[in-house]
């Protein structure tokens, strides 16, 4: 069966890179595809005039790059973010943040870089109080600990990470006083939110959401479920909407050279795309599906048709097998003192 992303009428190819690097990360690439401007590695929502960790240049609003999310808000459209990563992670933060370091997700992170978060606001702070972030109608994902202080715990007993003593979740509620809003932290809470609600914040885990194969369906909504709820909430607006949906754990699995989990996360992304296709009209809705950078995974050997894609691809000249899917980085190599190669057929793939 084909993935939904391969069923669209228009397909294209593009090259990803940062201004200062041959290979893009999710920060500079988010600035590029959401704002149309190439930037430096590790920076989000700023031009290449801002180098990584340059707090002073970050404060100059002439260096800020505004995203399609902000453009949509200025046109009176509803806006939202859905992700399986932390809401403060590089890709989703490209919708609303302007920062010299993608890792400045809370104020403690900024202090670790010997910078002042009162001058260079952390990403969580920008999501709640920034001009784009505070106007987002729907925000669903992980990263709860970025929003609460170390002196407090969340619904599951996990301590926060903030050192400024501020509970940004409570501040978000106060910010929306006078509007209909809901803060939810589990699947049941999300599914019970009225579709007429103006603002919804869903933080379902202290950090990234679990990989789908490790997800507790009773506790955490799937990417498809979050996408469905977001579209229902946003489509109530009269002027249309912009929704950013990220299957961010595909990337994480590849970084960890976990091919099985990466493929499973891709299937989950496929399901979310199908939800979007089913719930929208192609006459008035543009759906764009893209990755933000590639990985070193390769398809190797001459495996037979029907061979397990997660299995053995063949044998090399040393008569030892290699996997069909291999990575040029990570634990794909193992030191052997006798000069021979490790037999991967003995591993649990």
Image (tube, rainbow, N blue to C red):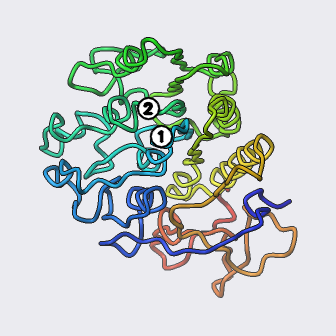
Q: Are marks 2 and 1 in contact (CB under 8 Å)?
A: yes
Residue at the spot of label 1: 73
Q: Residue at x 67, y 54 (%)?
A: 286
In the image, residue 141 sits, relative to residue 269, either above or below, namely above
Mark 1 burial class by Cα count in 10 Å: few <14, some 14-19, many 20+: some
Q: Quadrant of residue 119?
A: top left
How far apart, in angstroms, are the residues tagged by discs 2 and 1? 8 Å
Q: Residue at x 55, y 48 (%)?
A: 248
Mark 1 lies on a secondary structure that is helix
In the rendered image, residue 339, in percent from the top left (x then y), is placed at: 49, 79
Q: Nearer the viewer, mark 2 or mark 1?
A: 1
121 left or right, relative to 173: left
In the image, residue 338 sits, relative to residue 223, either above or below, namely below
Nearer to me, 206 or 64: 64
Image quadrant in which the C terminus is located: bottom right
Mark 2 lies on a secondary structure that is helix
286 left or right, relative to 113: right
In the image, residue 304 sits, relative to residue 91, either above or below, namely below
Image quadrant in which the N terminus is located: bottom right
Nearer to me, 194 or 245: 194
In the rendered image, residue 245, in percent from the top left (x then y), is placed at: 59, 45
Residue at the spot of label 2: 135
In the rendered image, residue 225, in percent from the top left (x then y), is placed at: 70, 33
């Amino acid at each position: 069966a084909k993935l939904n992303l391969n069923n669209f009428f228009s397909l294209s190819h593009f090259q990803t890179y940062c201004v200062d690097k041959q290979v893009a990360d999710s920060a500079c690439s988010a600035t590029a595809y959401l704002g149309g401007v190439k930037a430096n590695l590790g920076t989000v929502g700023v031009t290449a005039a801002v180098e990584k960790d340059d707090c002073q240049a970050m404060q100059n609003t002439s260096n800020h790059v505004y995203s399609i999310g902000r453009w949509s808000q200025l046109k009176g459209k509803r806006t939202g973010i859905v992700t399986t990563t932390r809401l403060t992670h590089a890709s989703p933060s490209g919708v609303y943040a302007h920062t010299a370091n993608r890792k400045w997700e809370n104020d403690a992170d900024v202090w670790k870089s010997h910078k002042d978060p009162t001058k260079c606001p952390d990403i969580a702070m920008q999501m709640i109080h920034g001009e784009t972030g505070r106007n987002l109608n729907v925000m669903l994902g992980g990263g709860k600990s970025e929003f609460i202080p170390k002196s407090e715990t969340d619904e599951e007993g996990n301590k926060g990470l903030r050192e400024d003593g501020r509970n940004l979740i409570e501040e978000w509620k106060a910010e929306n006083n006078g509007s209909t809003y809901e803060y939810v932290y589990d699947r049941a809470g999300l599914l019970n939110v009225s579709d007429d609600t103006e603002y919804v914040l869903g933080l379902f885990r202290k950090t990234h959401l679990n990989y789908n194969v490790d997800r507790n369906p009773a506790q955490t909504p799937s990417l498809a479920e979050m996408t469905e709820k977001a579209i229902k909430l946003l489509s109530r607006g009269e002027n249309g909407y912009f929704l950013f949906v990220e299957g961010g754990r595909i990337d994480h699995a590849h970084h960890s050279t976990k091919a099985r989990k990466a493929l499973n996360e891709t299937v989950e992304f496929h399901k979310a795309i199908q939800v979007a296709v089913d719930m929208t009209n192609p006459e008035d809705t543009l759906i764009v599906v893209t990755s933000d950078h590639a990985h070193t995974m390769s398809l190797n050997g001459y495996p037979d048709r029907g061979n397990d894609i997660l299995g053995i691809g063949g044998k090399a000249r040393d008569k030892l097998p290699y996997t069909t899917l291999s990575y040029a980085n990570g634990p794909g190599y193992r030191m052997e003192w006798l000069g021979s190669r490790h037999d991967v057929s003995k591993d649990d793939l």
